[in-house]
């Protein structure tokens, strides 16, 4: 069963003369453990696709299925719970809360979901540790480098038992070494069974994905499967 399935998703913003059709009947599926990259020019609908996949926005038509459940048949409460528990987001600008330390940022989603502060902190520390950030746990975002902030935001997206990772240009503000590190972390999550969709402008990083979906004006214009196994890409880069 796919972790994420989009069935004929269309999205129209605005009305009348200002109407924009951001997506036209998009079909997309992502299996557990697999990474799909989405590429396309600015305005092609990439962010709209992710927000609809993550139930942050409703499609104008079509169905979103997450973990076998039709979003349209779930109550708003159930959708919110699914967003807190099962879906992790990574944004280009990190979206970390400035007044919270790294570990507080990472454990926040669990605490919001009712996990005790102690357990949430332990899970947050484990996620940071996995990303090589244990020694940055008590730092505030403005005490971190761009690459470290992005790793904290990835830790926050994968903390707990999330099954779907949605990342909108997670390497956009990073240099190529940090961009590769981010991609390697996302592949690491996939290796543990997480399904991931990553928007990227970087063809090199996109080639790490099992499948690359190209959008143009809200339509899928091409899809490629890449032959190498993700295993080989999990090896440390020679210069890191
Ligand atoms: P991308 O992420 O590929 O740059 P977006 O998904 O952000 O593209 O946008 C796709 C199209 O939808 C663009 O024409 C954009 O202007 C429009 N759009 C996106 N969000 C909104 C919104 N909230 N209201 C109106 N139009 C929007
Ligand atoms: Mg965008």
Image: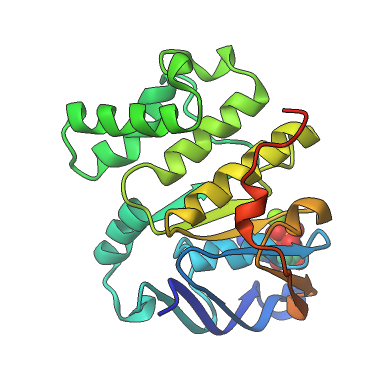
Where in the figure is residue 225, as x and y percent of width and height? 72, 74
Q: Quadrant of ligand 2?
A: bottom right
Where in the figure is residue 188, as x and y percent of width and height? 52, 47
Which residue occupies the foreground of this view, 152 or 57?
152
Q: Is residue 69 above or below residue 49?
A: below
Position of 202 compared to 66: left or right? Answer: right
Q: Is residue 69 above or below residue 188?
A: below
Position of 114 compared to 179: left or right? Answer: left
- The mark total stands at 0
* Residue at position x 54%, y 35% in the image: 95
Classify residue 134 by image quadrant. Answer: top left
Which residue occupies the foreground of this view, 104 or 194?
194
* Residue at position x 47%, y 13% in the image: 139
Q: Quadrant of the N terminus?
A: bottom left
Q: Quadrant of the C terminus?
A: top right
Which residue occupies the foreground of this view, 55 or 137?
137
Where in the figure is residue 209, as x and y percent of width and height? 67, 61
Where in the figure is residue 179, as x and y percent of width and height? 72, 39
Q: Is residue 105 above or below residue 112?
A: above
Position of 192 compared to 94: left or right? Answer: left
* Residue at position x 45%, y 44% in the image: 157
Q: Tell me, what colour scheme is on the image?
A: rainbow
Which residue occupies the foreground of this view, 30 or 100?
30
* Residue at position x 20%, y 28% in the image: 117
Classify residue 35 by image quadrant. Answer: bottom right
Q: Is residue 156 above or below residue 137?
A: below
Position of 30 compared to 75: left or right? Answer: right
């Amino acid at each position: 069963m796919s972790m994420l399935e989009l069935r004929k998703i269309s999205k129209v913003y605005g009305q009348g003369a200002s109407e924009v059709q951001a997506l036209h009947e998009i079909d997309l599926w992502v299996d557990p453990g697999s990474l799909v990259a989405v590429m396309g020019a600015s305005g092609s609908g990439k962010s709209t696709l992710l927000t609809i996949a993550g139930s942050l926005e409703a499609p104008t038509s079509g169905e979103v299925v997450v973990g076998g459940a039709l979003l349209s048949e779930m109550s708003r409460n159930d959708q919110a719970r699914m967003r807190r528990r099962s879906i992790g987001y990574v944004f280009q600008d990190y979206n970390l809360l400035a007044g919270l330390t790294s570990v507080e940022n990472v454990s926040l989603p669990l605490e919001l979901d009712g996990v005790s502060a102690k357990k949430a902190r332990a899970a947050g520390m484990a996620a940071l540790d996995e990303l090589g950030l244990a020694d940055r746990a008590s730092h505030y975002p403005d005490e971190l480098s761009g690459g470290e902030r992005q790793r904290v935001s990835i830790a926050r997206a994968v903390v707990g038992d999330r099954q779907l990772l949605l990342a909108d240009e997670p390497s956009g503000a990073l240099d190529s070494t940090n961009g590769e590190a981010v991609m390697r972390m996302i592949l690491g999550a996939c290796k543990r069974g997480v399904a991931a969709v990553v928007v990227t402008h970087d063809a090199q990083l996109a080639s790490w994905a099992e499948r690359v979906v190209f959008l143009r004006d809200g339509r899928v214009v091409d899809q490629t499967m890449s032959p190498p196994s993700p295993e080989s890409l999990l090896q440390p880069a020679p210069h890191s």
